[in-house]
């Protein structure tokens, strides 16, 4: 292999890497939106006092999930391994389930401010993933 071939291969590899990083810049923004919407949904929960409010809450939550994951599917550059998604999704599910079904109802009552703070805690895995992804694509 000639030195010119090696240098051109390295240039092409650097070019591909730059395109992948550029194509993946949507992901940290999506994760930040995911985290912010999580905070909003958890904050909204103590305000749900009727069946209609519960139905509205469920419709908003499901619509949000469908839209964000459909939008993600259309992106050319996504996290390559399901392990990357499990790294933040499993802690998020555990925190959400524990907070919404046990901690919030048991200790927070209908105090919206405390639920909002709990929403930040529940959203922390998504915020961490957004930060981790941003550090990867900004290089």
Image (tube, grey):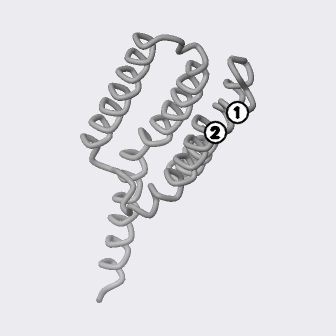
- What residue is pinned by disc 1? 106
Who is closer to the viewer here, 122 or 81? 122
Residue drawn where x is 57% and y is 40% of the image = 96
Give the SS element for disc 2: helix
- What residue is pinned by disc 2? 102
Q: Position of residue 38 (x, y in %)?
A: 54, 31
Who is closer to the viewer here, 22 or 99? 99
What is the residue that sits farthest to the bottom in this orientation?
A: 1
Q: Position of residue 102 (x, y in %)?
A: 63, 39
Q: How many marks?
A: 2
Residue drawn where x is 52% and y is 47% of the image = 93
Who is closer to the viewer here, 89 or 46? 46
- Vertical side of 106 occupied by 2: above or below: below
How far is the residue under mark 2 from the one under mark 1? 6 Å
Quadrant containing the N terminus is bottom left
Label annotation for residue 115 = none
Q: Where is residue 37 in the image (x, y as percent from the top left)?
A: 51, 27
Give the SS element for disc 1: helix
- Vertical side of 97 occupied by 105: above or below: above
Residue drawn where x is 36% and y is 83% of the image = 3
79 horizontally vs 1: left or right:
right
Q: Position of residue 5 (x, y in %)?
A: 30, 78
User: Image quadrant of residue 122?
Assistant: top right
Who is closer to the viewer here, 23 or 12? 23
Q: Residues within 10 Å of mark 2 (few under 14, many from 20)?
A: few
Q: How crowded is mark 1: few (under 14 residues within 10 Å), some or many (20 or more)?
A: few
56 horizontally vs 31: left or right:
left
113 horizontally vs 129: left or right:
right
Q: Do the residues labelled 2 and 1 touch (CB within 8 Å)?
A: yes
């Amino acid at each position: 292999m000639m030195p010119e071939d090696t240098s051109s291969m390295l240039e092409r590899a650097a070019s591909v890497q730059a395109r992948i990083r550029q194509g993946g810049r949507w992901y940290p923004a999506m994760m930040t939106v995911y985290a912010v919407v999580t905070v909003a949904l958890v904050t909204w929960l103590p305000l749900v006092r009727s069946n209609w409010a519960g139905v509205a809450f469920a419709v908003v939550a499901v619509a949000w999930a469908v839209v964000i994951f459909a939008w993600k599917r259309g992106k050319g550059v996504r996290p390559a391994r399901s392990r990357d998604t499990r790294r933040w999704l499993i802690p998020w599910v555990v925190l959400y389930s524990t907070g919404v079904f046990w901690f919030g109802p048991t200790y927070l009552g209908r105090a919206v401010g405390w639920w909002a703070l709990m929403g930040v805690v529940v959203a922390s895995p998504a915020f961490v993933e957004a930060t981790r992804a941003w550090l990867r694509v900004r290089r």
